Image (cartoon, rainbow, N blue to C red):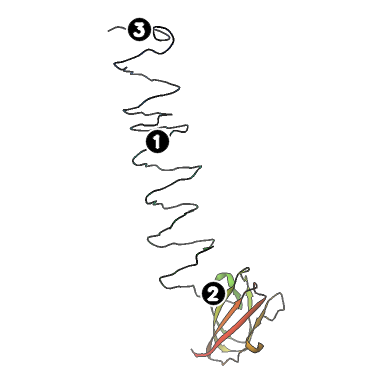
Amino acid sequence: MSRIRADRIVDRAATGAPLFPNGAIVTGVTTATTFSGALSGNATSATTATTATNAQGLTGTPSIVVGSVTGTTGSFSGNVSVGGTLTYEDVTNVDSVGIVTAQTGVRVNAGGVVVSAGGLNLTGPYKENITAVSALQIDCSQGNYFTKTINGNSTFTFANVPTGCAYAFTLELTHTNGTVAWPDGSGGQGTVKFPANTPPTLTTGKTHLFMFITDDGGTTFRGSTLVDYEN
C-alpha cells in the first residue's frame, strides 16, 4: 500500500483540481466550501445540497424535496403551503383562504367568533347559555338569556352592554311578589321604553318573559313582554 503525504494536490498544470475517474474513498472528514453535482448515499451534514437521500443538519437556504417530515418543533418565517390535509392539535393563529373543516367541533375559549362577510349558516340547533341573575343587575356580557325570581319590589339595572352593534336579551322573570322597575335614565343607566311608554301589568305568582333590544349601546332599550305564564 502506497501513501502520499502532501499539503495540496492540484492537476498537472497546477491550474485546477485533479480528476478521480474511478472515484475516491475517504474514511475521515471531507470539508468543502461548495458542492456541485448529484449526491447519492447518506449525507449527514449537507449544508447546501439540493438533493440528498437522508438530509440532516441543513443550514443556509437549500431547497429540498422529501417524502415525509417528522419533528418535534418547527418555526417558519414565511408562508407554509399544504396541498393535502393539515392535521394539528395546537396552533396560535389559523389564516385560511379556503374552507376550514373541523371533524369534531370548534371550541372558542376566548375572543369570540367574528364573521366579517358571508353570514353564518347553521344546519343544527342554535343553543345559548342560561344565566341566573344573582342580584338585580343584568350583566349583558354573560349572554342573552337570563332568569330571575323576585319576591319583593325590584329595580333592575343593565351593565356591560355591547356597543357598535345591535344587542338583544330575554329575561325570564318568576314573580312571587312585589313591583318591578326598569332603568329610567338616572344613575348613568339608559332608558327602557315599552309600547305606548307603559310597562306591562304583572300578576304575582306567574312567570313573565321580557325581551329587550338596543342598537345604541344601551342608551335606549325597547322592551316587549309575554306575561302571566303559569309557573
CB within 8 Å, label 1 to label 3 = no
| 120 lies above or below 87 | below
**Residue in view at x 35 percent, y 31 percent:** 52
Badge number at residue 4: 3
Cα separation between marks 2 and 3:
88 Å
Give the image quarter of residue 190: bottom right
| 206 lies above or below 21 | below
**Residue in view at x 37 percent, y 12 percent:** 18
Identify which amino acid the numbered label 1 is placed on.
Answer: Ile
| 193 lies above or below 131 | below
Give the image quarter of residue 221: bottom right
**Residue in view at x 63 percent, y 75 percent:** 158
Which marked residue is nearer to the observer: mark 1 or mark 3? 1
| Left or right position of 216 against 169 | right
Q: Quadrant of the N terminus?
A: top left
Label 2: how many residues lie within 10 Å, few (<14), some (14-19) or many (20+)?
A: some
Residue 135 image offset from top left, x and y in percent = 60, 77
Badge number at residue 144: 2
In this rendering, the count of numbered labels is 3
Q: Which residue is mark 1?
A: 64
Q: Earlier in the sequence, mark 2 or mark 1?
A: 1
Q: Earlier in the sequence, mark 2 or mark 3?
A: 3
Closer-to-camera residue (155/123): 123
Closer-to-camera residue (74/206): 74
| Left or right position of 30 against 191 | left
Identify which amino acid the numbered label 2 is placed on.
Answer: Asn
